[in-house]
Amino acid sequence: MENREGTGPRLVVGTGYALYRGPLADSHTHRHAAFQVAFAPGAADPLPTVTATDGHGVRHRGAALVVAPMVRHRMQPVRELVTYFVDPHCAFADRLRTPGGPGITVAPHWHGLREEQVRPAGALPSDRVDPRLRAAMEAAGDDAVPLAGLAARVGLSPQRLRALAQEQLGLPLARWRIWRRLARAADALRAGSTPAEAALLGGFADQAHFGRRMREMTGLTPAAVLPALRPVLPPVGGQARRAT
């Protein structure tokens, strides 16, 4: 799913990552099932900064921030933000893991990160994640398969699969499954579905359930991301039009 043309916010979803570029209004406290790299674009000296407040009320401010999976935080409003969500079982995620453990890290060397730097490693498997766990994560998109069924597919007990997910990813597979549902629902929104239709296509009980989960895991609502999913395209016949 990719929006390359038009004006306004931009959202790209590729293999192993998603990219958003656009304004960020005041967001809700949330925690996502992916690594996040966030920075404000620009080459001024000093570099522009972004700020996130963690679940303990500590403010983290720098030219770029890396937020580990399942870390509760809230991004402060900024006129324009570039943010990458990187799947924790892809090779690029290995570059984002820090010796200090999970949390929010000020990482100025990631300022100006480009999509072409992320794309190749996003499509490769992590060397630090058990192949059986990666296989279970890939199969987790099938909502009809319970955790016990996923474990059986990859030759693990449910208890061992849960432990691997927590040890190597820092998140339960149930949260990863919700993250994948959100991606499906966002794709449906981009294709022109209403929020209610997108909720059902994503595997949520209803539109309210979809909205709660999106706010809980991204800090945003479906209405807030629609401008990025359906950008305004250049005028045709003198009138701008929405992508469908």
Image (spheres, grey):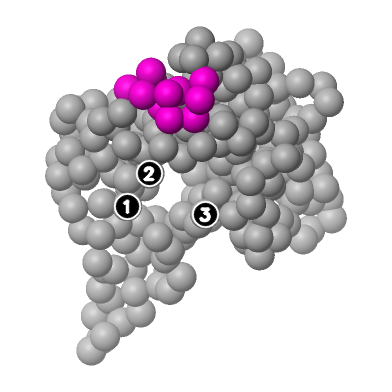
State yes or no: discs 1 and 2 in contact (Cβ < 8 Å).
yes
Type of amino acid under label 1: Asp
Which residues, given as a range, are shown in magenta?
Answer: 146-156
Q: Residues within 10 Å of mark 2 (few under 14, many from 20)?
A: some
Q: Quadrant of the N terminus?
A: bottom left
Q: Alpha carbon of mark 1 to alpha carbon of mark 3: how far?
A: 14 Å
Which residue sits at x=64%, y=31%?
Answer: 130
Q: Position of residue 114 (x, y in %)?
A: 68, 61
**Secondary structure mainly formed by the magenta segment:** helix
Q: Which mark is residue 15?
A: 3
Q: Give above or below for 107 relative to 121.
A: above
Which residue was labeled with disc 1?
Answer: 187
Q: Is residue 147 magenta?
A: yes
State yes or no: discs 1 and 3 in contact (Cβ < 8 Å).
no
Q: Quadrant of the C terminus?
A: bottom left
Residue 208 versus residue 6: which sits nearer the camera?
Answer: 208
Q: Which mark is residue 183?
A: 2
Give whichever of discs 3 and 2 has the lower sequence position.
3
Residue 125 vs residue 17: left or right?
right
Taking the view exactly as shown, the residue that stands out farthest to the bottom is 237
Q: Give above or below for 197 relative to 98.
A: below
Q: Position of residue 237 (x, y in %)?
A: 23, 89
Instruction: Find numbered disc 3 in the image and state the secondary structure of the residue it sits on.
Output: loop
Type of amino acid under label 3: Thr
Q: Position of residue 128 (x, y in %)?
A: 72, 34
